[in-house]
Amino acid sequence: MTLFVNEVPASAKRLLVTLLPVALLSAPLPLFAQPASQATGDELPLEEIQTFAEVFERIKRGYVEEVDDRTLLRNAMRGMLSELDPHSAYLDAEEYQSLRETTQGEFGGIGIEVGMENGQLLVITPIDDTPASRAGLLPRDVIVAIDGTPTESMSLQEAVTLMRGEPGSQLRMMILRTGEDAPREFNLTREAIRSESVKHELLEPGYGYLRISQFQSRTPEQARQAIERMTREQPLEGLILDLRNNPGGVLQAAAGVADLFLDNGLIVYTEGRLSDTAMSFSASPATPASDIPLVVLINSGSASAAEIVAGALQDQRRGVIMGTDSFGKGSVQQVMPLGNGEGLKLTTALYYTPNGRSIQAQGIAPDVEVVRGRLEVAESRPELREADLGGHLDAQQPATQTRSSATERLRDDYQMSEALNLLKALNVVDRRR
């Protein structure tokens, strides 16, 4: 979601007019500023402005190295936003362009989504088929250092900027993983990340798999095409929608994907302080997959837009949510371009599921909890059956489809294997009805 702003707000103009004379010329403050105890919502508090100006001036005069005014003011704006929440940020021209590239699905880097929690830089999820995922980075890994630079006092945008770079260049990261005492080092090679957000395949005849790795502008149409390709071969008896390690993305794209499985009702709504942040998305009657049995896989790396889809399908009882608790990012950010070619990413609203649930810091709890694991087939000893007995009667039975053997992928992915088994069980019960 993007809000275009072409004019600096009046309060920001007043702030600059107020601060610069005080900091640089030690001139008296304008009369419109009032003491904090008397200030109203539209007025600037006098004491805080004086303190800011004093800090500004002392840095200018006494810091060990000379710092220009522009750098100090830029840092002040960054700090003002970073202290609000982990997702608000001031974006310079490079960072603003980088964010636009990410939402459009093409950028240079290692393919990783990061976030801040309790002052720590965390891996939210690696993007599929990228250097980060191939190296084995996992959700909730703590990034201790990037190219030797500690991340302890680093902002989220600074970290993203360090990780982005020209394809072919090297990146060294120190990672601390839960349950481990010492950090481990990862050496990665940046690539041109041209991520296709949707993949699909037939796991078995009649049972499809739809993987969405993130929500980009084109994701709903790509998902629609994938469903149509699978159903073109034969009617689907069940579909697995995989949203694990999906960090989110564009709000409208999430609503569009949920609409593929719903033919009526509310999908998501948002509420904020400003009237233009209140939005609502509802399903349209035309949908390619309104009656296909559905299992949705989520985990701790499923965040934001992924939680919108899972929450809508759960509240409308459209599918079974399986896996582990999701990440719990229930806020909406607007990206506002500024007149100098830079931008502002600001949290302006919270989103709510159709039943009015806020996911913020709560997450989506699955209907069926299944932890991550690998399926091991136990060796069994030979067993005697009727067909092994001499002289047994041969019953005449109609030809049946042979059971397909479990693929290596299902063996390695216990959650996916359980989702497939649940779809088959749902179809058995449905046929009996």
Image (tube, helix red, strand yellow):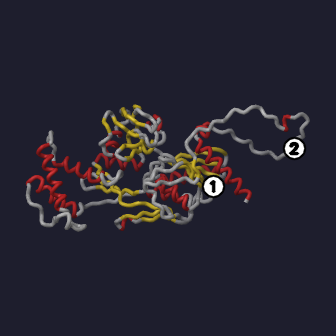
Asked if one can make out residue 422 in the rendered structure from this viewpoint, the answer is: yes
Position in image of residue 210 (x %, y %): 56, 48
Q: Residue 326, relative to residue 17: is it above or below?
A: above
In the rendered view, does 370 fall on the left or right side of 218? right
Q: Residue at x 46, y 57 (%)?
A: 359
Q: What x and y, as percent, mark residue 151?
A: 32, 40
User: Residue 100: which numbered mark, if any?
Assistant: none
Residue beneath the point at 25% across and 61% down: 7
Can residue 242 be seen here? The reply is no
Q: Is residue 92 above or below residue 282?
A: above
Q: Secondary structure at mark 2?
A: loop
Please name the residue shown 85% across and 38% down the image: 386
Graded by Cα atoms within 10 Å as few (under 14), some (14 to 19) or many (20 or more), the crowding at tag 2 reads few
Callout 1 secondary element: loop
Q: Amino acid at mark 1?
A: Pro
Q: Position of residue 59 (x, y in %)?
A: 15, 46
Sequence-first tag of 2 and 1: 1
Q: Residue at x 20, y 51 (%)?
A: 73
Q: Which residue is mark 2?
A: 395
Q: Nearer the viewer, residue 431 or 119?
A: 119
Circle 1 crowding by C-alpha within 10 Å: few under 14, some 14–19, many from 20? many
Please name whichever residue, 86 or 397, is drawn nearer the observer in this view of the structure: 86
In the rendered view, tell whether residue 330 sits above or below residue 171: below
Name the residue beneath numbered marker 1.
293
For the N terminus, the quadrant is bottom left
In this view of the protein, which residue sits in the foreground, 74 or 36?
A: 36
Query: On the rendered image, what quadrant is the C terminus found in?
Result: bottom right
Q: Residue furthest right?
A: 391
